[in-house]
Image (cartoon, grey):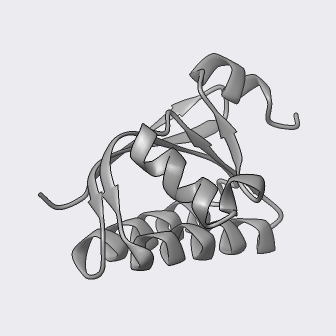
Amino acid sequence: MSLKSSTRNVDGITVLDLSGRITLGEGSVVLRDTIREILGKGEKKILLNLGDVTYIDSSGIGELVSAFTAVRKEGGELKLLNLTKKVHDLLQITKLYTVFDVKDDEAAAISSYTK
């Protein structure tokens, strides 16, 4: 199963709903291209909803870090929402859980962005 993404706007925040696997190849390319497209439109507040992401490999982790860096470089904020247990554990093991701002509730995540 490859990665599928859809975007929606909530209170000026771009919410990127992802489902599937973020893996070497198509999955990481979809994520990279989507983030670039969002930044290209001048939107800098991005929330990645990972609730339906079943698996992330090392390439996918690299892509998340790359997306985080790209958004930060543009002066924006990238946060993660609805991590599955597998993804949560993976971020804990790689110590990236402390790097990303991770939220469990979409409304709380939306209101946590700087106005």
Residue 9, x across and y down, in percent: 53, 34
Give the residue displayed 68% in from the left and 53% down from the top.
Answer: 97
Between 39 and 92, the one nearer to me in the picture: 92
Q: Quadrant of the C terminus?
A: top right
Residue 30, x across and y down, in percent: 32, 68
> Is 75 placed above or below 83 here?
below
> Is 4 placed above or below 51 here?
below
Image quadrant where residue 114 sits: top right
Q: Is residue 98 left or right of residue 62?
A: right
Give the residue displayed 30% in from the left and 80% down from the top.
Answer: 24
Between 88 and 50, the one nearer to me in the picture: 88
Residue at the limit of the structure toward the front, as seen here: 93
Q: Quadrant of the N terminus?
A: bottom left
Between 71 and 85, the one nearer to me in the picture: 85
> Is 49 placed above or below 34 here?
above
Q: Is residue 22 left or right of residue 110?
A: left
Residue at the limit of the structure toward the right, as seen here: 115
Between 64 and 78, the one nearer to me in the picture: 64
Residue 86, x across and y down, in percent: 40, 47
Query: What is the tally of numbered marks visible in this picture?
Result: 0
Residue 102, x across and y down, in percent: 67, 41
Give the residue displayed 25% in from the left and 82% down from the top.
Answer: 25
Give the residue displayed 49% in from the left and 39% down from the top.
Answer: 83
